[in-house]
């Protein structure tokens, strides 16, 4: 027989011989929420060893939510399955599923470089025009870490046609998405960093500059900095960093002054330390065009005019424009690999806006993309009256999902045609993506395919575990509201997963 005990972390389950002998059963009936029904499955309870792992940890006062299903769809472990949780980046598994379902794994972007005018000898008399279509991958991730790859291709095309001067302006169309740079709920102190950049239909290098800091000078001096692309003056660095004695702790401090491209650096770095950090920029379409024009001039093509941005969705037309080159992105399933394995918020939010644009044939917005995502969740048996969505990546702390709905989704999608693409986009324990450095010396290595999640106070894992006996488990394990170090939460998660690996 099962009885419920109140714990600081919520409700947990222990097995007893007779509920009459256990006074803790006399709890208000509204606490009886550990059981959930799923047609054709058994009810679930939390195993005593897992309960002990949580209750004896330093994070026993956090909120723990666990659900595990076996290969037949039976719930075999569960705690707080009916509760809403902040999923952090585990939400990307839902977003990825919606993208693959609605757009198809072979969907791709085409970004076009147009000319408006004509070539006279070695001069293009007229303008260059770039149409932004929302491609997040005009960066180095698929091009041997060379973010200038697309620009190189376009410059090669111009040079091959004998063009050495542009006697006109360079225009960029950025109106495919609205002008709201961030989803609701992103915190201001994240906005300087690569994981929270501005979202724009015309984007380059994930809308960041890549800073390198080398602390090779004497103690008390300022470390040397360089950045790419080519120390662009599009950003201004105020370098107030200090080199500290060897053996001292590195303390990171980067802050872009909001609304500007001035970035204040105040880190302290031990002598000999080397640091890299991608930092966000403001006004991404202008960053795109500014970098392109500078690269043209670097390669010997003079640009006589100025840079202009057109963000009027309803006035855009490519009539009277001559295509010079069309850049086709990698297919969507490759972008999804980047999105999930590296937990890329930028790719996610770009694709969410694109999804809204394609579904409704209007200017893409985060809200429209989330509406499509919510429709998809309803189809996947979520109770969408409870769901709260602020973004597609899970960076917003206001985003909430039900854990049992989430884990059931992971089980249900295994029958869908797109599932192999989603499965292969997950990190592999101890081997790849955000799990590359976790579980390396654990039997979980190579046997756990999962999505990780982290925001302040939230640590999450969702995915598929092949156990020692060969059983395939579907697992969602989320901890909210913890105050200990995240490494301690990771340790507890590993203990729980290893128990499941060894005992099922």
Image (cartoon, grey):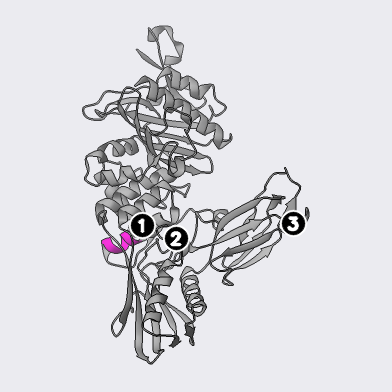
Q: Does the magenta stretch include residue 63?
A: no
- Dot 1 falls on a residue whose secondary structure is helix
Image coordinates for residue 126, horizontal then vertical, percent: 39, 89
Identify the residue at horizontal 38%, vertical 7% (top origin).
17
Measure the C-alpha gap from mark 1 to mark 2.
21 Å
- Residue corresponding to mark 3: 217
Cβ–Cβ under 8 Å for marks 1 and 2: no
Tell me which corner region of the image, top left, top right, bottom left or bottom right, holds residue 278. bottom right
Residue under label 1: 352
Task: Tell me if residue 311 can be seen.
Answer: no
Instruction: Say whether residue 434 is left or right of residue 413.
Output: right
Label 2 packing within 10 angstroms: few (<14), some (14-19), many (20+): some
Give the residue pinned by disc 2: 140
Query: Alpha-carbon distance for marks 1 and 3?
Result: 45 Å
- Report the magenta stretch's main SS: helix
Q: Which of marks 2 and 3 is nearer the N terminus?
A: 2
- Tell me the CA gap for discs 2 and 3: 31 Å
């Amino acid at each position: 027989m099962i009885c419920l005990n109140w714990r600081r972390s919520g409700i947990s389950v222990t097995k007893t011989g007779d509920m009459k002998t256990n006074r803790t059963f006399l709890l208000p009936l509204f606490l009886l929420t550990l059981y959930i029904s799923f047609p054709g499955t058994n009810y679930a309870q939390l195993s005593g060893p897992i309960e002990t792992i949580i209750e004896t940890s330093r994070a026993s006062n956090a909120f723990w939510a666990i659900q595990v299903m076996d290969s037949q769809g039976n719930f075999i472990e569960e705690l707080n399955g009916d509760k809403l949780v902040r999923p952090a980046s585990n939400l990307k598994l839902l977003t990825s599923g919606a993208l693959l379902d609605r757009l198809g794994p072979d969907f791709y972007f085409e970004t076009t470089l147009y000319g408006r005018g004509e070539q006279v000898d070695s001069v293009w008399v007229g303008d260059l025009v770039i149409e932004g279509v929302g491609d997040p991958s005009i960066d180095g991730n698929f091009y041997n870490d060379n973010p200038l790859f697309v620009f190189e291709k376009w410059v090669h095309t111009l040079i091959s046609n004998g063009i050495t001067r542009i006697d006109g302006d360079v225009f960029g169309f950025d109106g495919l998405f609205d002008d709201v740079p961030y989803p609701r709920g992103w915190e201001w102190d994240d906005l300087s960093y690569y994981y929270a950049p501005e979202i724009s239909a015309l984007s380059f290098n994930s809308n960041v500059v890549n800073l390198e800091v080398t602390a090779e000078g004497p103690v008390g001096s300022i470390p040397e900095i360089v950045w790419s692309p080519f120390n662009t003056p599009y950003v201004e660095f105020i370098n107030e960093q200090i080199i500290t004695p060897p053996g001292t702790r590195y303390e990171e401090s980067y802050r872009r002054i909001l609304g500007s491209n001035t970035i204040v650096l105040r880190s302290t770095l031990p002598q000999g330390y080397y640091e890299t950090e991608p930092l966000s920029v403001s006004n991404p379409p202008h960053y795109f065009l500014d970098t392109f024009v500078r690269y043209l001039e670097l390669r010997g093509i003079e640009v006589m005019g100025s840079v202009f941005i057109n963000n009027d969705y309803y006035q855009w037309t490519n009539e009277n424009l001559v295509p010079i080159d069309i850049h086709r992105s990698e297919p969507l399933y490759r972008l999804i690999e980047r999105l999930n394995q590296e937990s890329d918020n930028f790719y996610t939010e770009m694709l969410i806006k694109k999804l809204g644009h394609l579904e409704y044939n209007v200017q893409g917005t985060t809200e429209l993309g989330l509406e499509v995502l919510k429709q998809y969740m309803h189809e996947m048996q979520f109770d969408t009256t409870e769901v709260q969505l602020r973004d597609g990546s899970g960076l917003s702390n206001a985003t909430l999902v039900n854990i049992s709905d989430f884990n059931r989704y992971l089980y249900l999608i295994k029958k869908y045609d797109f599932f192999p693409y989603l499965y292969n986009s997950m990190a592999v324990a101890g081997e790849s993506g955000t799990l590359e450095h976790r579980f390396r010396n654990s039997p979980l290595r190579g046997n756990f395919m999962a999505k990780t999640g982290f925001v302040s106070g939230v640590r999450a894992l969702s995915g598929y575990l092949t156990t020692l006996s060969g059983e395939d488990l579907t697992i969602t394990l989320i901890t909210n509201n913890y105050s200990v170090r995240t490494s301690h939460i990771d340790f507890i998660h590993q203990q729980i997963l290893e128990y499941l690996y060894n005992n099922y």
